[in-house]
Image (cartoon, helix red, strand yellow):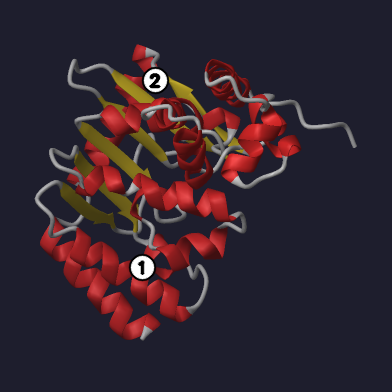
Amino acid sequence: MAARKPSPDLIKFGAVVEELREKAQLTRASLAKVVAVTPSYVGQVEKGRTRCRRDFAMRLDDGLHADGEVMKAWENIVKKVGYPAYYEDFPSAEETAVLLRTLSMVLVDGLFQVESYSRALLTDEEAIAYRLRRQEILIRPSPPMACLVLDEGVLYRQVGSRETMQEQIEFLADFSLRENVLVQVAPFGFYRGLRSSFSIATQADQSNLLFAEHAVGGEITSDPCNLNEGVQVFTRLQAGSLNPEETRRLMRKVVSERWT
């Protein structure tokens, strides 16, 4: 099997670490001793051959007396690494958005998943951590307005155990009470123009980025025609959905009748 090609972002981060190490006049061996790893591992990080974990980035920052430079680079460069290539640009738009509109046709969107639900879908610990970290966007000071429309089938489609489904749906019902979170269920039926799950991230300057899921991946676009179509589909879907209070009543009914 061919060796995996290093990510450009990891190479960029590694170059920052190498520059700071040389500035501190440390060899890889001496830095490795300070941060309690092998010199070869330091080399792998510097060459972009491995993804540096956040806790190790903190140790590097301390070991290099970098005054936050390593952590700044990790937040700006490495944090998004681990997302599929077709999705990599969307988390950045999501983090700076003032409005998020999401349609979930098959599964609860990752932005709204509880840990047990994520674990039923993912096996990689870092991927699970990335997914759960996304939710911090919605609970930070000055969060974006988040509008989630769920196809009714999502409430009945078992992911993980019955307990997982109960936890996930109850979380959605409670989370939707936040002022910046709007959750609605679209009842079973036909909705014109609806083909797949998608998300639209709107920035303060009213620019938009759309991510649409495909059967084997997804696509990100800022094309005005695609965005206009996405906004129209979402607006029609919202209009045909249960209102937030009706949605909470339905979710609690489904939990009681199917998942408890």
161 is higher (above) or lower (below) than 240: below
Per the rendering, the mark at residue 226 is: 2
Per the rendering, the mark at residue 53 is: none
Asked which quadrant contains residue 188, the reply is bottom left
Q: Is residue 109 left or right of residue 127?
A: left
Q: Is residue 208 left or right of residue 133?
A: left
Q: Position of residue 105 (x, y in %)?
A: 42, 50
Closest to the camera, between mark 1 and mark 2, is 1
Q: Residue at x 42, y 32 (%)?
A: 71
Front residue of this view, candidates 2 and 48: 48
Front residue of this view, candidates 41 and 238: 41
* Placement of the C terminus among the 4 image quadrants: bottom left
Tell me the kind of residue under disc 1.
Gln
Q: Position of residue 34 (x, y in %)?
A: 58, 41
252 is higher (above) or lower (below) than 65: below
Dot 2: what SS?
helix
Tell me the kind of residue under disc 2.
Asn
Write down the residue under mark 1. 168
Asked which quadrant contains residue 82, the reply is top right
Front residue of this view, candidates 10 and 83: 10
Q: Residue at x 45, y 80 (%)?
A: 162
* Placement of the N terminus among the 4 image quadrants: top right
Q: Earlier in the sequence, mark 1 or mark 2?
A: 1
Does residue 216 appear in this view? yes
Tally the marks.
Answer: 2
Q: Residue at x 65, y 38 (%)?
A: 32
